[in-house]
Image: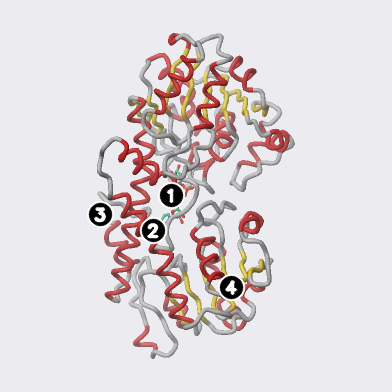
Amino acid sequence: MSHSIQIAVVGSGYVGLVAAMCFAEMGHQVICVDNDERKVAALQGGDTLIHEHHLPELLERYRNTRVRFTTDLAEATNECSAIFIAVGTPQSDSGDADLSYVEAVASEIARHITSYKVIVEKSTVPVYTNEWIRRVIERNGVNREMFDVVSNPEFLREGTAVADFLHPDRIVVGADSERAAALLSAIYAPLTEGDYYKNEGAIAGCCSTSAPPPLLQTSTKSAEIIKHASNAFLALKISFINAVSNLCEAADANVEQVARGIGLDSRIGPKFLRPGIGYGGSCFPKDVAAFRSVAEQMGVDFSLLSEVEKINVGQKKRFLSKVRSALWTLRGKKLAVLGLAFKGDTDDIRESPAIDLVEMLLAEGCSVVAYDPAAMKRAEAELPASAQMRYASNIDEAAADADALLILTDWPEFAQLDLRKLNATLRYPIVIDGRNLYDPNVMFDHGFTYMSVGRPTITQTHTREQSKVPTSAGSQK
Ligand code: UDX
């Protein structure tokens, strides 16, 4: 039977804020600490600051009851038995994770420890970070018996973060002390014992079956490696299918059929085999680089990860070549761009391949009119509006009189365009789809020249028979 525990979460970014709200949803009392006063004030006022399903409703429900927002880490350390560190670990110039925020928080916590605490690494950190945190706390005069450091990596995805947190495939607890492991087990008991899923108002998972998740207890070092290895493996899967898609283009095969054929092997699985313009976001690029760097520092050859990165960069260049091959010259061409976020259902543009591509197109002398359902405000800070770079308030405005339409983010609404109207709105009916959102045959029937990733190009100069792509399960999304 689970009981309520006092938890501090330090850092109110994606991981920290989602963890804080989900711990509250699981029945715990949470103090969420951030040193950014404006952020704390916004959260206290009910503004989540990030675009994430369920977060507004959870914030509304718990902000004055189970969750408190503060800048006061001393008070949080004092009142809570578990302190989750969820601050940023940005990429430094060398590719390493910059752990200065983690260190600063650890020394600040150390200054306020007066009773036993479990310090939990929630941020993605390289192996051995727990030992550094332990050393920092000890250097600040705290006795070894007064604390433990645990690694509890988070696997949530942006866009489905709350559902992922509450319905994880697994919970990993890396602990070298039974006392600390027991506290983490108690915190996650509402999930592992299944009580949470029996609640009438429980938030549903995206794809899991709501069976209670297993809690895997490991050493702290193993848990740290599990997080980096998971993200690196997923990035590898994406680069692998992207490389296969290039082969399919060369051989006039269809990557959707190939991915389905591969993914039906239960040892491989169908997920993360969607080809496109490369992975982006705040995790994969940073974590692959950090994992490669950790391996290097430990004298381990992991050049496979360099290949993963190389293929990822190559995907953007290939897409640019497609635009060039569709339009011949690029200078002065007007392009409609759908999507700026690094993936659908988020306003996040960090390491977005869409932003990189827009920058490349602008450098080639194109003018761009972009539309994204959520990421335009953030994009504008990076790519200011100008005569060459404009932001449209809807899809039609972006497409009006454009020489071609480019799909760069897999927002669900971009897969449901009114094709008849689109054809009439564009100057030329050319669609270059970096996310394979359409069946090429449907695009042919609507009069488009259609280029996608790893599938035969459809051009209106061919006869229907020549151009038609054999349909198969999976070619239509
Ligand atoms: C990822 C991990 O999935 C998550 O477990 C971890 O905690 C954080 O990093 P996230 O960055 O939110 O989550 O996005 P994800 O859905 O994994 O997509 C990452 C990138 O890969 C996106 O740019 C996406 O478009 C791309 N992608 C994903 C593909 O190109 N093909 C795929 O098949 C899947």
Viewer-proximal residue among 415 and 44: 44
Look at mark 2 in the image and give the residue it sits on.
312
Q: In this rendering, is residue 244 above or below 224? A: below
Label 3, on which residue? 265
Q: Of callouts 1 and 4, which one flags the residue occurring earlier in the amino acid sequence?
A: 1
Q: CA distance from mark 3 to mark 1?
A: 27 Å
Q: Which residue is mark 1?
A: 285
Secondary structure at badge 2 equals: helix
Please name the residue shown 52% across and 28% down the image: 85
Q: Are marks 2 and 1 in contact (CB under 8 Å)?
A: yes
Q: Looking at the image, is mark 2 or mark 1 earlier in the sequence? A: 1
Left or right of residue 267: residue 412: right
The answer to whether 97 appears left or right of 424 in the picture is: left
Q: Are marks 1 and 4 in contact (CB under 8 Å)?
A: no
First along the sequence among labels 4 and 2: 2
Query: What label does residue 336 carry, if any?
Result: 4
